[in-house]
Amino acid sequence: RETERSGFSPFSPGPPSSPLLHSSDQQVAAAAAQEGQNSRGVKRLPRLLMATLNDSFLADLDELSDNEDHVPDEVEADLGDLEDDVDGDFADIEALNYDDLDSVSKLQKTQRYVDIMQKVEDALQKGQDVPSYGITLEDDPEYQLIVDCNTLSVDIENEIIIIHNFIRDNYRLKFPELESLVHHPIDYARVVKKIGNEMDLTLVDLEGLLPSAIIMVVSVTASTTSGKPLPEENLKKTIDACDRALVLDLDKKKVLDFVESRMGYIAPNLSAILGSAAAAKLMGTAGGLSALAKMPSCNVQILGAKRKNLAGFSTATSQFRVGYLEQTEIFQSTPPSLRIRACRLLAGKSTLAARVDATRGDHTGKTGRDLREAIRKKIEKRQEPPPAKQPKPLPVPDSEPKKKKRGGRRLRKMKERYAVTDMRKLANRMLFGVPEESSLG
């Protein structure tokens, strides 16, 4: 019945018309079905259908190729420019020599770097000027210099990372395990410059460069390392890279000192909470006051945090991740058990103060001092001991009449369950003066 409803029977001369096939395709399919009455025609039916589908697909591809011939000239020009840009980028990458330090590190030779450092040195020698609150912050040239200094400090940090990778790749042949023991780039550069090509680290004094525990681990690891002495040329490149990284670190400190000396004018509320030094470091790492104001407090909390390597020691006494906020006076004066709470409070209030300073809401710093006082009160509140438990006096005997316990269905059921029945009374009954009959059965 279903074959009759569908209009197609295995004994019918042709297949039903399909909306997916064109009229010509339907005619070919009908002819193939007519031929399919014999066994050879049945075998040819799938082949003919595939042939018609292939023809339709080829026709569609021809139409697409015809459309591609009419591409506008502007699109062709854009595609040509894109290909030229890609080829130029690949050419620059191929021309870059990773064995040459000057081709890897180019920041110190840029005119922008030289100009900003010259202005910073002149400003540090001249001293701090009287701030001019009459003009807007964006029009003040000193503020523009501070913004440039914040951007430059981020660029210096990135350049130090690039030089650190260069030093690590060259010194890996001498001491491959050192990069997993000393993570900070400046510390790594100092240690590499101190060790040099020396294979016996007992002759090298690393005191003052690393903690005592890390020095011990480095010495033990160096005694079993598989590294070999570097050639003189590679060693010279590595030492030059270390010197360049240390010079960049000194320039970064100069920039931060300049920003710190102007923090009372640029960010008075943030300086009132954290102090000028910590506020300048936060601004330098974040990339400016506006960037710091847009940053969430959870990210402000870890700005400047170093990756700590315990070298197999216990993590029970290790400190949580905290950056420049640990250098503040509030954090240092807080007991260790409450420092996590204090760090979160400092991060949240510092973000609010940075937003006030970014909008020039209060140039007197009163908002920052109020926020600092609020942090202190919350920490002091946390340090207060819990209230002592007051002794509860005993009640006066028979001072109040006994309360009648309420009865109910549960109480009645319980009394009925444990009540002495008449049968139990008769079972335990004994007459006076009459001997009891007993048996030992």
Image: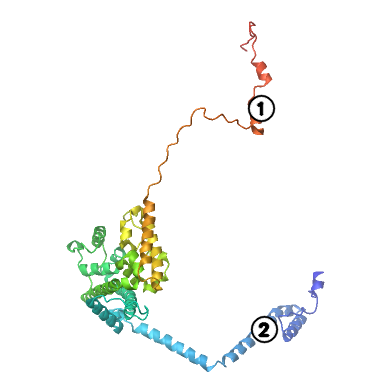
At label 1, the amino acid type is Glu
Kindly identify which residue carries mark 2: 51
Check the image and name the residue furthest to the top: 433
Q: Secondary structure at mark 2?
A: helix
Q: How many marks?
A: 2
Label 1: which secondary element: helix
**Residue situated in front as seen by the camera: 209 or 260:** 260
The N terminus - image quarter: bottom right
Give above or below for 226 relative to 387. Answer: below
Most foreground residue, 386 or 121: 386
Q: Position of residue 242 (x, y in %)?
A: 24, 73
**Mark nearer the viewer, 2 or 1:** 1
**Disc 1 crowd, CA 10 A, few/some/many (<14, 14-19, 20+):** few
| Quadrant for the C terminus in the image | top right
- Disc 2 or 1, which lies upstream in sequence? 2
Judge whether 59 appears above or below 401 on screen: below
On the image, the x and y values in percent for residue 249 come to: 27, 72
In which quarter of the view is residue 112 placed?
bottom left
User: What residue sits 68% from the left and 84% below the top?
Assistant: 52
Q: Which residue is mark 1?
A: 416
For the residues marked 2 and 1, what is the alpha-carbon distance in whole angstroms? 96 Å
User: Relative to 385, does residue 49 appear above or below in the rendering?
Assistant: below
Any part of residue 133 in sight? yes
Around disc 2, counting alpha carbons within 10 Å, would you say few (fewer than 14), some (14 to 19), or many (20 or more)?
A: few
Of residue 245 and residue 138, the one placed in the foreground of this image is: 138
Name above or below for residue 435 compared with residue 2: above
Q: Residue at x 64, y 24 (%)?
A: 419
Q: Is residue 72 left or right of residue 58?
A: left
Looking at numbered disc 2 in the image, what kind of residue is underneath it? Ala
Examine the image and state in which quarter residue 11 appears: bottom right
